[in-house]
Amino acid sequence: MANIVQFENVGLRYGTGAETLSDISFTLASGTFYFLTGASGAGKTSLLKLLYLAQRPSRGIIRLFGEDAVTMPRDRLPGFRRRIGVVFQDFRLVPHLSAADNIALPLRVAGIVEDEIDQPVREMLAWVGLGDRAQARPATLSGGEQQRVAIARAVIGRPEILVADEPTGNVDPEMADRLLMLFDSMNKLGTTVVVATHDFNLLSRLPGAQMMRLDKGRLLDPTGALRYPPVRPG
Ligand SMILES: Nc1ncnc2c1ncn2[C@@H]1O[C@H](COP(=O)(O)OP(=O)(O)OP(=O)(O)O)[C@@H](O)[C@H]1O
């Protein structure tokens, strides 16, 4: 399976402090489901930001879709970002837009004509179980409903990679399970999925998923040992 993402010796430092992420090296195989775990403050959100190009690393190499994402000219970034769907920890729904218009945003930004927006939006609303809330503003939706709008918005453009930061943080276990099944169904359609979570119940629900563990800004290998950067030949 082709690698869709490659990080090599990546480090991230905010300002002049110590590195938040150090020596991060991994590859993501296309079409695979990954969980990213680690204690609060371990650097999960920071790693996801590097992945969806909201943050540039302080050092190291990041290749996305086979191209160098670090040295990429800024004007090419939006096109790349459109290939990555993001479910933010705090949803980031647009407050004055209805659920339907929030979900439609990525299609409108991509310049899809209005005639071709209504149908997929209705399908997405039904898919996340919000068919009867199309016109509701975010403030009138529950946390779990807002989360489902955020998920629908992240996947409507059929992204190649879906990144979700603590997507079950605000919902009960039953809803967490339903949301996980939505991600799983996207993955079965071929999307590479990365879900950051510290909900261990979730991890046990998808035993086939790959595990990435962060500890104080460093990746651990599957045995729990620190994963050291690959040795470069020569
Ligand atoms: N913009 C920023 N400027 C400075 N420091 C930051 C910034 N964003 C995150 N940090 C710091 O980086 C470290 C890792 O934060 P991050 O949010 O990536 O962790 P996390 O594993 O996602 O935590 P949580 O599970 O609580 O969301 C923390 O010490 C945090 O304070």
Image (cartoon, rainbow, N blue to C red):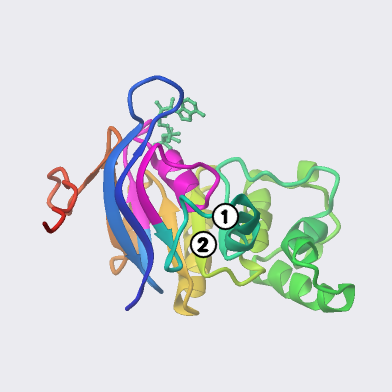
> Which quadrant of the frame does ligand 1 lie within?
top left
Residue farthest toward the front in the current orientation of the protein? 234
The kind of residue on which mark 1 rests is Val
Q: What residue is at 45 percent from the left and 78 percent from the top? A: 188
Question: Along the horizontal axis of the image, is 15 left or right of 209?
Answer: right
Q: Residues within 10 Å of mark 2 (few under 14, many from 20)?
A: many
Question: Along the horizontal axis of the image, is 225 left or right of 218?
Answer: left
Can you see residue 133? no
> Residue at label 2?
162
Determine the CA span between mark 2 and mark 1: 6 Å
Q: Are marks 2 and 1 in contact (CB under 8 Å)?
A: yes
Which quadrant of the figure has residue 150? bottom right
Label 1's element?
strand
Q: Nearer the viewer, residue 132 or 53?
A: 53
The kind of residue on which mark 2 rests is Leu
Region in magenta:
35-62
Q: Residues within 10 Å of mark 1 (few under 14, many from 20)?
A: many
| Residue 183 horizontal/vertical position (percent) | 50, 65
| Residue 169 horizontal/vertical position (percent) | 50, 43
Q: Quadrant of the N terminus?
A: bottom left
Q: What residue is at 48 percent from the left and 51 percent from the top? A: 71
| Residue 209 horizontal/vertical position (percent) | 32, 65
> Residue at label 1?
86
| Residue 138 horizontal/vertical position (percent) | 77, 46
Q: Earlier in the sequence, mark 2 or mark 1?
A: 1
Q: What residue is at 40 percent from the left and 47 percent from the top? A: 197
Question: Along the horizontal axis of the image, is 216 left or right of 50?
Answer: left
